[in-house]
Image (tube, grey):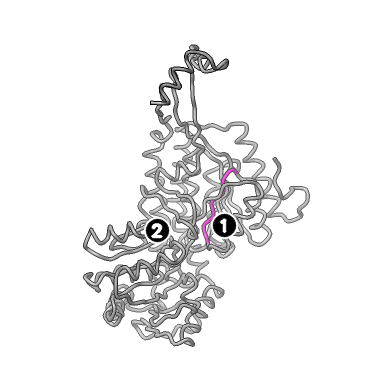
Amino acid sequence: MTASVSLHNTDHPEVAAMLRAFDTQRTAFRLRPGTSASERLALLDNLRGVLVKYQDELCRAIAADFGHRSHHETKFAEILTSLENIKYYTKNLRKWMEPEKRHISATHMPAKGWVQYQPLGVVGIITPWNYPVLLALSPLICALAAGNRAMIKMSSFTPRTGETLKRALAEAFSEDQVAVVTGGGIVSDAFSRLPFNQMTFTGSTNVGRTVMAAAAENLTPVLLELGGKSPCIIHESYPMADAAQRIAFGKCWNAGQTCVAPDYVFIPRGKTPEFVAAMRKAVTTMYSSLVNNPDYTSIINDKQYKRISSYIDDAKAQGAEIFEINPAGESFAGTRKLPVLLVGKVKPDMLITQNEIFGPVLMMMEYDRLEDAIHYINDRPHPLAYYYFDYDEKRADFVMRNSQSGGFSVNDVITHVAVEDLPFGGVGHSGMGKYHGKEGFASFSNARSVLVKPKFWTVRFLAAPFTKPTHKIIEKVLLK
């Protein structure tokens, strides 16, 4: 099979370099499709080494791409979480690579059967801009642990981060093992059309459809980690201060530019003023000011800033109630930072109701019965994350059993993504497939069935002619 974009039919230097890297990796895998646990562990150790070495440079690059991005957020969410994933995979890899013995029925005896996880080949990873290091390296860790070779397409929205990560990974790996691709437009389109053995895409649902359609040309399986509107429900018995503190943390982290950030919250009828007051206190405790606060992150670029602003303008025009949380009463003119905004009295046809917000803006809705909130959420596309606040375990279990989402958290938001032993991914419109945990190793592997029979071949007793006594015995057994 040849790449769908020909090496000889493009004059674009970045596309040509990408195609050369792809052909190099495919040839290398074909010549040596299997690697030992020791070799894979060495690759993970190389990754750990350069990640530690380049951590500060990556923090500076991400901050430059965002206009401002908290170094503490980057180190925790991207560097530390990636290092913990490497540690987890290093600890468990040998065990996962062992053959899984499977049951063999009497009909097939004597025989042995097992599942052997083998590499898929060359995998493609398409990385978004909001967590450019974490969402490049998390799938890469899974790919390397499973014995694959990988190409990473970085977002054109984070060019400095892309170039820094490219230099770091070039120091740790040869191009026939890991290659980083930068650029947009024709490069992005060509990357999604390469005949990878597997492709992972993290990003919006609309772009995910485009990537999946391009991958279908080569029957490339796609792991999609998309987004959507992740809801919160606060039970009437739950302390509002506790809920606000935890929701504010998730909504302010990376200025809400997180695929699992809370998008809207269901509040018991009549308790919206209490929630707004509790959110003001929670946000102010974390951020006494916003504009020049090194802990508070900017919106990535003008396009995203204008998109979020248009949602707010549209909501105001349609009668929404806007509560601005601006602890120091600052002007945000000339910056890409936004105050935390709570939006009440929302309507179904508002832009903010129809689209994922991806910023420090939170919709508020009230409910009378818990079942009403559950039904509202169930009537919409399945979210990537679902958050329920209640200290009653039975009610929490009821909500969990009567809902669908990629992940479900009780009394917390967003942190489930950083738990290395929990699989991460969506369902329905929020994605397909899982990575992280053992599921990540499996997603980047071919679960190959193996059946071994000895010299004594029992199948001959089942072969024609079908008048043999053996078949009469079988019929008697089946009719029991």
- The residue that disc 2 covers is 404
At a point 50% along the width and 77% down the height, the residue shown is 351
Quarter of image, res 31: top right
Given residues 124 and 376, the one toward you in this image is 376
Residue 406 location (% of width, % of height): 42, 56
Given residues 357 and 333, the one toward you in this image is 357
**Which dot marks residue 154?**
1
Label 1 and label 2: CA atoms lie apart by 31 Å
Please, what is the three-letter code of the amino acid marked with disc 1?
Met
Quarter of the image for the C terminus: give it.
Answer: top left
At a point 65% along the width and 45% down the height, the residue shown is 21
Q: Which SS does the magenta portion mostly show?
A: strand
At a point 40% along the width and 40% down the height, the residue shown is 90
User: Is residue 199 located in the magenta-colored stretch of the structure?
Assistant: yes
Please, what is the three-letter code of the amino acid marked with disc 2?
Gln
Q: Residues within 10 Å of mark 2 (few under 14, many from 20)?
A: many
Secondary structure at numbered mark 2: loop
Q: What stretch is highlighted in magenta?
A: 197-203
The count of marks equals 2
Q: Residues within 10 Å of mark 1 (few under 14, many from 20)?
A: many
Quarter of the image for the N terminus: give it.
Answer: top right
Secondary structure at numbered mark 1: loop
